[in-house]
Amino acid sequence: SSDHTHILLFTKELLSAKLMDGPVSPCCLKDLPLDVLLEVFYQLSCVSLTRTSLVCQHFHMLTQTPSLWKKLCTTTFGLTFRDNRELCDKMDRGWKDVFRDLCTKSSLQMFLPPPLPRDAYTGCNHYTRNCQIRARCCDEFFPCRLCHDITCDHTIDRFATDTMICMKCLCVQAVGAHCSSCNTEMAPYYCSHCKLWSSLERPIYHCDKCGICRQGKGLGIDNWHCDHCGICLSLSMKATHECQIKDGLKVTCPLCPSTQLLFYSREPVTVLQCGHASHVKCLHERLQNNLLPDELPCLPCDNARQQQQQQQQQQQQQQQQ
């Protein structure tokens, strides 16, 4: 029908426009009938089809439809495969693999999926890796847990992550250090407990006592773990370290609106002599704001001081009455 054709043309233009800048959001397409969505995918090139598969799990599953890649094989190479026994023997692998083999053997690299943007192939601004993770809460793929938390109105349970997608071959699989399909290394560093993949641009190790990965070469090498404070500290501080509040970093920063515990912060954290902790950047900003003569650098201590003064004033007023 004409309405059906108009929907196809509109959706194709929308996909083509969005794919110029990156993956398209599935929100505006989720209500389209399945046959309409597949018909749109039939109109896409190999490049657009590959990038569309990165949008969400639903799109990824649809782009694996054998007939989509069969159409690309026939339209690109004009082959029917009836007389090609070698290709027929490979049919069990799927039309997508057949298309890739044809491109490679024919030296038609222009038809192969091009290198994806950095945020897809090598991670994001937070981590360098060759995979994306699926958030169980959203059932969608994200470059990393931090990208998820920035995009969504809730935080991800990083330890519950059990599925990833390889950005080299686009195979959805269980999390691991290497792709189960193409054997690509997801990252030089992988922690199966934290579900963390990262490059070796900065050393990382896993602390069993903290329960998470920390920056550094490892315990006994450049860091040590203080059981009372519940944190890893530099070995250079071990001789002079004085324990403060037990598990003192299991709190939020009192100087900023962040709801993340300082214990998990990726930003530098400092502990004052009173035992209260905050982000280093937040403390510097507070000190640069020209504190009053009677103000204390530590905000929690200063608030406690003000409350004590108010209580004393109230007691004096009551005595005078």
Image: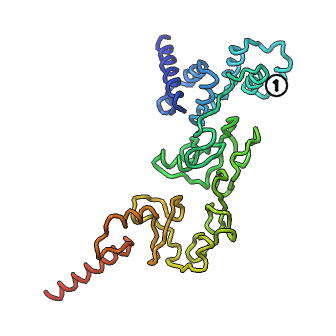
Image location (x, y in percent) of residue 47: 62, 25
Q: Nearer the viewer, residue 172 or 284?
A: 284
Image location (x, y in percent) of residue 319: 18, 88
Image location (x, y in percent) of residue 217: 67, 63
Residue found 44% across the figure and 78% down from its top: 274
Above or below, comparing residue 220 to residue 9 in the picture: below
Query: Which residue in the structure is indicated by mark 1?
Result: 90
Left or right of 79? Residue 306 is left
Count of numbered circles in the view: 1
Question: Which quadrant of the figure has residue 104?
Answer: top right
Quadrant in which the C terminus appears: bottom left
Q: Nearer the viewer, residue 304 or 59?
A: 304
Residue found 70% across the figure and 35% down from its top: 169
Image location (x, y in percent) of residue 32: 51, 25
Q: Nearer the viewer, residue 138 or 105?
A: 105
Residue found 64% across the figure and 72% down from its top: 224
Visual colour scheme: rainbow
Mark 1 crowd level (few <14, some 14–19, many ≥20, 10 Å Cα): few
Q: Which residue reaches farthest left? A: 321
Residue type at mark 1 is Lys
Residue found 63% across the figure and 29% down from its top: 50
Above or below, comparing residue 120 to residue 76 in the picture: below
Q: Which residue reaches farthest right? A: 85
Which secondary structure, mark 1?
Answer: loop
